[in-house]
């Protein structure tokens, strides 16, 4: 303890097999199972600011279950064991901590980006917009005191991608960065301001879809309406308050929010039908999947193998995390490179194979939405 606050020493990312655990974690899942010999056990998921880990209470499960609830910060005694290529906690005792005992920031995973920097990046993107009607609408939304603080701390998802405090704004800004590059590449074909506005607003409904005061979960509103409907309603309300916002622009903007999941079966009531909506849908999927795979590679519970555990959400496959080899620098002279010989022919054939494999992976990734 330090000044009444429990001093957390061990973080999930540092745990190794057989480590003794005497530390505190936030419980995000707690349910009971029955083992093969008919004995009840507790199935837990615990998190701290560094990651998450599954846990099991095998002995005295019923008594220990009475001592705490989901969303409590608890002191856990136990040890780390290998399980399905990763790590799991074998929990032998649990004690609930009171709010005065801990600082919540030790337990909630949070964006590694600086929060002030993300806020000013958001404001800068809006301020640089040429279209005054979109700029005005976005300013009214992102400066609304009921929206701005929530947007700046909300996670982008409960579990799949950017599932941490500040994840929504980080994901949104990442897509805006891609929009910046794509708009240069496709230039005249794309309305950059409209695409940027769609990028900024596509997931705005998540501020009400998810709860994020403790563990991340869906709100009743989120489960009943979903972030696409909530987002369109929010934007429509602000459009009505704006003076002279053109109907056609409103329709194009709302279409981007409605269609950003790309397919009807992934929750979009309309499939993308404009260039901006198609691009946004691909960028959203790409950013979510790249972030999810990056996080898997760094997941401390997934050690000891070049492969992650089977990833049901968004992928329906295990992901290879061995990484690509670093590029080999060629020390031979250019003239030698250009000469037609067996080596060069083999290199070219190998390069073509690698490119073909990479394209197959890309296409595969887009088959399933997060
Ligand atoms: Fe979404
Ligand atoms: Fe998104």
Image (cartoon, rainbow, N blue to C red):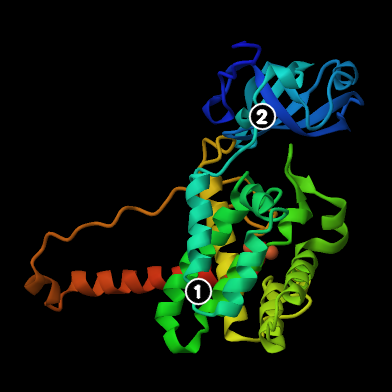
Give the x, y percent position of residue 99.
74, 22
The residue at 68%/48% (across/down) is: 159
Of helix, strand and loop, which one carries label 2?
A: helix
Nearer to me, 18 or 130: 130
Whether residue 306 is visible to the viewer of this picture, yes or no, is no
Above or below 15: residue 163: below
Give the x, y percent position of residue 255.
70, 80
Q: Quadrant of ligand 2?
A: bottom right
The residue at 10%/71% (across/down) is: 334
Above or below 258: residue 32: above
Give the x, y percent position of residue 185.
40, 80
The residue identified by callout 1 is: 129
Nearer to me, 168 or 118: 118
Q: Quadrant of the C terminus?
A: bottom right
Q: Quadrant of residue 19?
A: top right
Above or below 97: residue 316: below
Give the x, y percent position of residue 335.
7, 74
The residue at 66%/12% (across/down) is: 4
Answer few, some or many: residues within 10 Å of disc 1's Cα (few below 14, many 20 plus, some between 14 and 19): some
Numbered label attached to residue 104: 2
Q: Quadrant of residue 254?
A: bottom right
Report whether 145 appears left or right of 118.
Answer: right
Of helix, strand and loop, which one carries label 1?
A: loop
């Amino acid at each position: 303890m330090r000044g009444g606050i429990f001093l957390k020493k061990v973080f999930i990312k540092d745990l190794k097999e057989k480590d003794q655990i005497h530390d505190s974690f936030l419980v995000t899942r707690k349910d009971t199972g029955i083992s093969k010999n008919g004995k009840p056990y507790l199935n837990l998921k615990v998190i701290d600011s560094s990651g998450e880990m599954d846990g099991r209470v095998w002995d005295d499960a019923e008594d220990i279950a009475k001592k705490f609830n989901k969303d409590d910060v608890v002191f856990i005694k136990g040890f780390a064991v290998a399980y399905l290529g990763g790590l799991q906690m074998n929990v032998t005792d649990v004690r609930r901590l009171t709010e005065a005992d801990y600082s919540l920031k030790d337990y909630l995973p949070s964006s590694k980006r600086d929060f002030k920097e993300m806020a000013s990046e958001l404001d800068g993107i809006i301020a640089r917009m040429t279209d005054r009607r979109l700029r005005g609408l976005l300013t009214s939304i992102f400066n609304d005191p009921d929206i701005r603080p929530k947007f700046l701390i909300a996670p982008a998802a409960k579990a799949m991608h950017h599932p941490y405090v500040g994840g929504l704004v980080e994901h949104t800004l990442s897509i805006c960065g891609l929009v910046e590059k794509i708009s240069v590449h496709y230039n005249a074909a794309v309305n950059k301001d409209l695409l940027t506005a769609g990028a900024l607003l596509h997931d705005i409904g998540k501020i009400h879809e998810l709860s994020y005061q403790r563990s991340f979960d869906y709100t009743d509103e989120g489960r009943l309406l979903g972030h696409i409907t909530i987002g369109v309603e929010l934007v429509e309300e602000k459009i009505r308050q704006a003076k002279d916002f053109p109907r056609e622009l409103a329709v194009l903007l709302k279409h981007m929010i409605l269609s950003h999941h790309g397919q009807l079966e992934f929750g979009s009531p309309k499939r993308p039908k404009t260039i901006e909506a198609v691009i946004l849908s691909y960028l959203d999927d790409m950013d979510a999947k790249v972030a999810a795979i990056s996080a898997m590679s760094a997941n401390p519970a997934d050690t000891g193998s070049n492969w992650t555990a089977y990833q049901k959400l968004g992928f329906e496959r295990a992901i290879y995390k061995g990484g690509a080899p670093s590029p080999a620098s060629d020390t031979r002279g250019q003239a030698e490179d250009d000469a037609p010989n067996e080596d060069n022919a083999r290199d070219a054939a190998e390069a073509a194979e690698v490119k073909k494999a990479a394209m197959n992976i890309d296409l595969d990734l887009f088959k399933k939405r997060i």
